[in-house]
Amino acid sequence: MLEFEIKKVARIYRDVPAAQVETLHRFRAAYPYKQMAINNVPWRYIAGGQGTETVLLLPGAHGTADLAWLVLPHFADRYRVVSLSYPPVNSMAALADGISTLLTRESIRKAHVVGGSYGGFLAQVFVRHHPDKTDKLVLSHTSPPDPRRGKRSAVALRWLTFLPMGMLQTLFRKRLAGLVPEERGGADLELIKAQLREIVGYHLTKESIINTFRRVVEFDMNFTFTPQDLQEWPGSVLLIMSDNDPGTPEPVREAMKALYPQAKLHIFSGTGHAAPLIKRDEYLSAIETFLASGNLPDSGGPHNKSLERTPRDT
């Protein structure tokens, strides 16, 4: 069995089944990090797989590439796949422009962009800043800019910056853990929870955590999106939602439908913010079928429904 390099990190995983820990070890061995400097800032990312098309995976607020072990191997035998860890830059615009540079240096002309939750914020910025480098767009469990949220985040930032690192880590870890289901997470639940503890405790700096919030403020306060933004862009959009997601309540989901009126919809029932964990097979199938053809699979059961746009939705 492979081992963790840091003994303190190994203790985080002591309650995780050995087979699950081995899954993570094998992924990390098969997909080691790469690094490049962009504007004198180090960017860490994973690049692997094979194929003539590329899938770009934009992580959630944890901002770490190797949580993509849930998704990346599924696509790696048909696509080239790139998964990012966010560098500590303070704006979504800087992230989007840095991604464009990274793709160019990796000789990737354009990519299918998959952004979940916080990564969906960035994906929406990226397609507008760099439509020529965006093939298809998958937006999962995410929302449009919200000035009210931005104002709340700006107020929080005023005191977050003064917190000692230990308190900041605790708050951020609780924020991430609140989106992980306790009862329906399946066999991978303990592994995901341990990995989030590792990320917050050993990989994120105070600067990177603070800039995660700063980018939310910038996204919410500095960007205004309209349905007309992408009229000249030839790509297509898939929206993935859950009918009980606390991170994207019904008004937010309706706002996303209105913002992307031509999007395909894939709506889960009862999976909250964690469809990739609770119903991974259906989640991956929806993305894979969309990337291959732009069409969605059949619903696959009463707890998962795929909807085409209806007149009422437009």
Image (cartoon, rainbow, N blue to C red):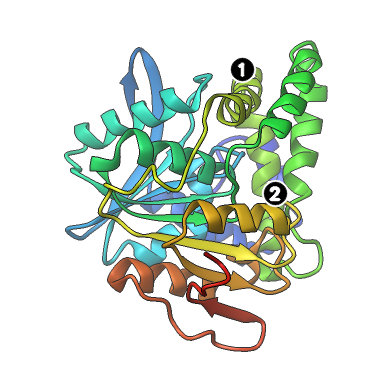
Image location of residue 268, percent across then percent down: 63, 72
Label 1: how many residues lie within 10 Å, few (<14), some (14-19) or many (20+)? some
Image location of residue 222, percent across then percent down: 54, 24
Give the residue drawn at x 36%, y 75%.
295
Whether 161 is drawn above or below 13: the answer is above
Please tell me the numbered disc located at residue 194: 2
In terms of secondary structure, where does tag 1 sit? helix
Taking depth in this image into account, of 259 and 114 the one nearest to the observer is: 259
Q: Which amino acid type is shown beneath numbered disc 2?
A: Ala
Give the residue drawn at x 29%, y 32%.
100
In contact (CB < 8 Å): disc 1 and disc 2: no
**In the image, farthest residue toward the bottom:** 301
Whether 289 is drawn above or below 256: the answer is below
- 3D distance between C-alphas at marks 1 and 2: 22 Å
Question: Which residue is the site of mark 1?
Answer: 207
Label 2: how many residues lie within 10 Å, few (<14), some (14-19) or many (20+)? some
Asked whether the viewer can see residue 2, the reply is: no
Q: Which amino acid type is shown beneath numbered disc 1?
A: Glu
Asked whether the viewer can see residue 172, the reply is: yes
Q: Is residue 117 left or right of residue 82?
A: right
Give the residue drawn at x 33%, y 20%.
37
Taking depth in this image into account, of 4 and 251 the one nearest to the observer is: 251
Taking depth in this image into account, of 35 and 146 the one nearest to the observer is: 146
Image location of residue 19, percent across then percent down: 60, 66
